[in-house]
Amino acid sequence: MGTPRPIAAEALREHFVSVYRLTDEQAAKMVKSAAKSIHNAFELGDQALGDGDLEMLSRFGHNLKGLFMNMGQPEWAEVARSVEQLAKANQLDEIHEQMQTLKEAVEHLPDAA
Amino acid sequence: MKTLIVEDDYLARSLLSTLLSGYGECHVATNGDEAVKVVEKALDAGEPFDLICLDIMMPVMDGQQALMEIRKLEKERNIPEPNATRVIMVTAIDDSKNIMKAFRQGQCEAYLTKPIDRDKLLEHIRDFGLID
C-alpha cells in the first residue's frame, strides 16, 4: 500500500457534514477542532521523539489513530497505528521515518502544522 | 439530559459536545482525575450527571480508573443502581481488552469505538431512556 493522499480541508468538512449530519457552520468548527487536535498531537509526538520516549510515542500513535478515525481517514489511522506498534517494539529509527510520512497527511490543513 | 464528556482529544470533545448539545447541557473534562472531581461536585450539589462519555486512554488518570472512582462515589452516597449515571466507554477500535475489562467489572453500560458513530451513540442513549 502506498502513502495515502494528504488530507484536504474541504474533504474533511464534507466528511463532517455527511457522516455526522452537521450544519456547514458546525462542520467548519470541526475542521478547526481537527487542526487544533493535530497540532497538539504532533507537539507531543515531536517532543517524545526528541526525548526518545517510547511510551509517549506509543500514546502519540494511539491518539493520532483515534483522531484520524474521527476525521474519516482510516488509511492515515493505519499509519498512526504503525507508530504505536513500532514504539511498543522499541523501533525508534523507523518511527522517525513514519513521523515524516504522517506530517504529509496534514500539510494541507490550515493551522495544523 | 446532563452529560459529561471526558476526552483528552479536542476534536472528539468538540464532536461529542456538538452531537449531544441539542439534548441538554454538556460539560467537558480532559482526563479521568478532572472527571472524578466534576462528578463528585455534581453529586454533592444534588445534580448528578445522567450520562458520561468516557475515553479510556487518557493522561493523569485513565478511563478505567475514573470509572471505578465514579462508581465508588455513587456507592458511598447509597445511590441505587437504577439511578446511577449511565456510562459509555469510548475507545479505539482495536482496544477490545479494555472494553471487556470495563464490562467484566460491570461498571459501564455501553461502549463506542472510534470513529464515533452518531447513530449508535443516540441509540444507546435512547436505550437508557434518557432521550425519546
Image: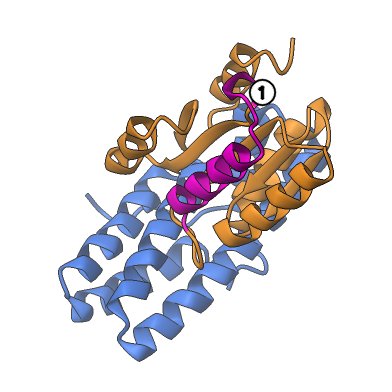
Chain colours: A blue, B orange
Whether residue A109 is visible to the viewer of this picture, yes or no, is: no
Q: Residue B2's x, y, as percent?
A: 78, 33
Q: What is the three-letter code of the residue carrying label 1?
A: Asn
**Left or right: A49 in relation to B47:** left
**Left or right: A5 in relation to A89:** right
- Quick one: which residue is furthest to the top in this view? B132
Residue B78 against residue B58 in the figure, above or below: above
Of residues B121 and A16, the one drawn nearer to the viewer in this rendering: B121
Q: Is residue B97 magenta-colored?
A: no
> Crowdedness of circle 1 by 10 Å Cα count: few (<14), some, many (20+)?
few
Residue at (39% x, 81% y) in the render = A48
Q: What element carries label 1?
A: helix
Of residues B34 and A60, the one drawn nearer to the viewer in this rendering: B34
| Overall secondary structure of the magenta section | helix
Chain of residue at mark 1: B
Q: Residue A29's x, y, as percent?
A: 76, 49
Residue A21 against residue B6 in the figure, above or below: above
**Left or right: A59 in relation to B1:** left
Q: Residue A107's x, y, as percent?
A: 53, 67
Q: Is residue B67 magenta-colored?
A: yes
Residue picked out by circle 1: B83
Residue at (54% x, 40% y) in the render = B71
Of residues B113 and B29, the one drawn nearer to the viewer in this rendering: B29
Range shown magenta: B62-83
